Amino acid sequence: MVEISATTKKNLDKLVEAIVLQAEILDLKTDFESKATGIVLESKIDVGRGPVATIIVTTGTLKKGDFFVSGLKWGKVRAIIDDKGKNINEAPPSAPVEILGINGAAKSGDDFIVVDNEKEAKTLSENRAQETKEAKNPLTFATQDSAFSDNSAEELNLIIKSDVHGSSEAIKNAISQIKHDEVKPKIILADIGMVTETDVTLAKASNAVLIAFNVKPSKEAKKLAENEKIKISSYNIIYEVLDYIKQKMSGLLSPDIQETVTGTAQILEIFKVSGAGKVAGSKVMEGEITTASDVRIIRDGAIIYTGKVGTLFREKNQVKQVSNGQEYGITVKDYIDFQKNDTIESFSVTSTDRMI
């Protein structure tokens, strides 16, 4: 075992020696003369160079001009750049290099295979795309879990544009860990490259949150977003993206509503008062009732009406509050059908925003 540190570069030379020694002991060999194969480590869309894939060659020698397939993408090697930023004409096994010439952004972990010609590259890429499309639309049957699951959860649509594929995958994985019974994040697009007009149009059509991670919108996209009042939220730290998504999800939650009974009274007599109409002569049995109270009229245990206090009277004078044990008169807005022995119950309602 070799103790190392990438930060301080401690024992990196010893690590290389240990790997070489193990390769010799295990008799690990590869073919330098065959067509190159490899693995995609990272990909991005560079503004000046277009799609760029970082690969490591595992077998064979990759040469400038080779046709290749990588995942669902294909291309012709236009340039090979080594780990020191130099343009080279070929890359041997174990060499990590950047290649230009791919027709789109490959995915981290995709294979990389050199083929004989352009026709073979196109055909293999198209066949893979068709197989993937068919695999995404299998015939499905309801399971016990899916049949009884709650499909009424709100969805927060997301469009995420990132600088590199690794960032995109990390963000998608982190978002998949956000769980809630009432609202869930739904990624409708996760891609690499700058924010385009198409992204803004999609965000408007799908009512989606548009997030740019380490990328900027094009001038056209920025102008369209301003005209359509679509916010482009830019971040460069993943946990800040997650905090923002949780905040937007929280906005879809219905608030916690809490009701508190503040007073009860019993109607003793019904009076007609000039200028006030029907007034219920009542006695506060518990708590207090104010002119700001919401009230409900209860008759034989059933709620007959719910509304607002109109006016409170004490000894023919208007008051703002009556308390336990006091007799008073009351009007209720838009209600006059009082009866003796009805119960008047006052209550307050508080609303609290919920957070994920």
Image (cartoon, grey):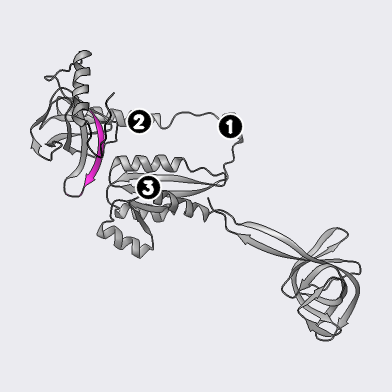
Residue 138 seen anywhere in this rendered image of the structure: yes
- Residue under pointer 3: 238
Report x, y in % for residue 102. Answer: 20, 37
Secondary structure under badge 2?
A: helix
Q: Which of 119 and 293 is in front in this view?
A: 293
Q: Which mark is residue 162?
A: none
Q: Residue at x 51, y 42 (%)?
A: 179
- Say which amino acid is labelled 3: Ile
Type of residue at label 2? Thr
The label shown at residue 145 is 1
Q: Quadrant of residue 118?
A: top left
Q: On the rendered structure, is 2 left or right of 278?
A: left
Q: Give the range drawn in magenta.
A: 39-48
- Dot 3: what SS? helix
- Quadrant position of residue 146: top right
Asked which secondary structure carries label 1, the reply is: helix
Whichever of callouts 1 and 2 sits on the residue coming sooner in the sequence is 2
The prevailing secondary structure element of the residues shown in magenta is: strand
Q: Where does the image place residue 254, in percent across and percent down from the top left?
A: 59, 55
Observer-side mark, 2 or 3, equals 3
Task: Give the residue number, with chain letter if any, for mark 2.
Answer: 132
* Gap between marks 1 and 2 measured at Cα: 26 Å
